[in-house]
Amino acid sequence: MPFYSFLLIMMSLEIWACSPSETSSSVLSTLDSLTIDSIYQQNGVTGSLVVYDQNHDAYLTYHGDRVNQGYIPASTFKIINSLIALEENIVPDENTMVPWDSVERGLEVWNQDHNLRSGIKYSVVWLYQDIARKVGEEAYRRWLAKAGYGNHDPGGGVDMFWLSGDLRITPRQQVDFLRRLYHDDLPFSQRSLAITKDILIYEQTDQYTFRAKTGWSDAFTPGVGWFVGYLETGDNVYFFANQLDIQKDEDIPARAQIVKDVFSRLGVI
């Protein structure tokens, strides 16, 4: 590999912590830049990654030029949208069914009644669009500002602003929001926070729990893909945001796979 190519790869991966001793004790420091670059290459995609190690106050960032760039949140917005829906009493709880509007859509699983729990699991767009029309733009502006979510901008259509409108959030902001969610440090009730954390369970074993949400918007070229959340292990929590360029449908599984590959290389899962 030419030296300048190696240098560029090294510059794309940074690890920060509050002190050198804590950096050295974080498992994040064991992942070298060539390894993380190879994970993206093996998945055939380009993107950026932020991981935060709670116990050691350490960050790992991949492609630092992108982690502070704003992107449409797509379906990762369902996290805060669930909180808002509960606070506004649009839906009373995670189990109350919302009737399907009988409009046939591309995914068969969407063509039925849903609640917040199944809506998160299957990323049911129509459900959250129905919620959004009931919440209204004024309430969204208030909640997004109070929660410090992205650029706070719900412009571009009350049921489209997180899919193709004006809302933007950076990978670093995604991680910051998730950290505040985990620590109940958001302007929502304890009940709404607890329910949202519960419905975010993406994968669970005896060793770990992923609470996470995928996202994908094809309103841009390239498409915007996400996998954001946090990994709870026996003695630590790792927060993450993986943002990808989606060039083709075959790229979509890489959103979650890259994060799992990174944690596997770190020996966390």
Image (spheres, grey):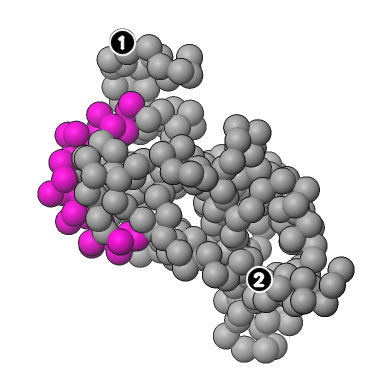
Specify whether residue 208 is in view: no
The amino acid sitting under disc 2 is Ser
Q: Residue furthest right?
A: 1
Please give the label number shown on residue 206: none
- Number of numbered markers: 2
The spot of residue 191 in percent (x, y) is 31, 47
Please give the label number shown on residue 12: 2
111 falls in the magenta region:
no
> Which quadrant, please, contains the N terminus?
bottom right
Helix, strand or loop for disc 1: loop
127 falls in the magenta region:
yes
Point out the frontmost of discs 2 and 1.
2
Q: Earlier in the sequence, mark 2 or mark 1?
A: 2
The spot of residue 93 in percent (x, y) is 30, 34
Please give the label number shown on residue 102: 1
Q: Are marks 2 and 1 in contact (CB under 8 Å)?
A: no
Residue 32, image quadrant: bottom right
Q: Magenta segment range?
A: 126-151
Q: What residue appears at the point 21 percent right and 40 percent down from the top-left corner?
A: 158
